Image: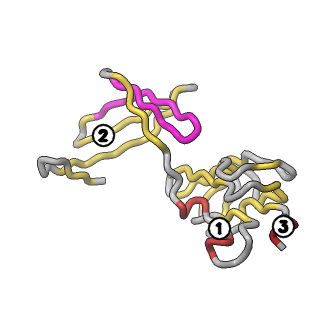
Amino acid sequence: MEIQIDDGSWYTVKAEHVEDGERLKIRTNINNNISTFNSYVAADEVTVFLESGKMQFELVQPKFLSTTIDQMGGGSGSKVIAPMPGVLEKVLVRPGDHVKKGDNLAVLIAMKMEHSLKAPKDAVVKSIGGIEGSNVAKGAAVITFEEDSNEK
């Protein structure tokens, strides 16, 4: 990716996740100057530790990554669908689980990135649309919720 800073200079920037046991490291390559940073992810926040201190960032879930049937124009939010084709990396819920709006339900790997699929509402999980490691098509139901009698 190319970025431009305030003085008008352009830089080539690459960032990657580095596996290192239990620690999460982020490696950046800015115009071939490589730096590695320890970081910590908790809920919706990332903390990156620098020599001069730490920086904290809020993780914002793009709407297209937590699309429901409602947003696709076909239902009452009774399903969470795959926004793009990918591999179902992790399933964090089971049928019968009660979830709250915003809870992480599953992780989809697409385009070499992890996409968290979140609950669009408080609900009870009815079924899972695949097993961990399975391929998922764009638009496929990943999580289906039990129908709420209040929505009829």
Where disc 3 sits, the SS reads: helix
The residue that mark 1 highlights is 137
Q: Quadrant of residue 47?
A: top left
Position of residue 55 relative to residue 75, above or below, is above
CB under 8 Å between discs 2 and 1: no
Q: Amino acid at mark 3?
A: Asn
3D distance between C-alphas at marks 1 and 3: 31 Å
Question: Where is residue 42, by image quadrant?
Answer: top right
For this rendering, which residue is in front, 39 or 148?
148
Q: Residues within 10 Å of mark 2 (few under 14, many from 20)?
A: some
- How far from the left and from the top, in percent, is residue 100? 72, 49
- Is 62 positioned to the left or the right of 85 in the image? left
Marks 2/1: CA distance? 33 Å
Residue furthest bottom in the image:
73
Q: Residues within 10 Å of mark 1 (few under 14, many from 20)?
A: some
Q: Amino acid at mark 1?
A: Ala
Task: Specify the label residue 29 is tagged with.
Answer: 2
Label 1's element? loop
Q: Looking at the picture, how far across and down is residue 132, in whole percent?
A: 72, 50
Mark 2 element type: strand
- Give the alpha-carbon distance from disc 3 to disc 2, as whole Å: 52 Å
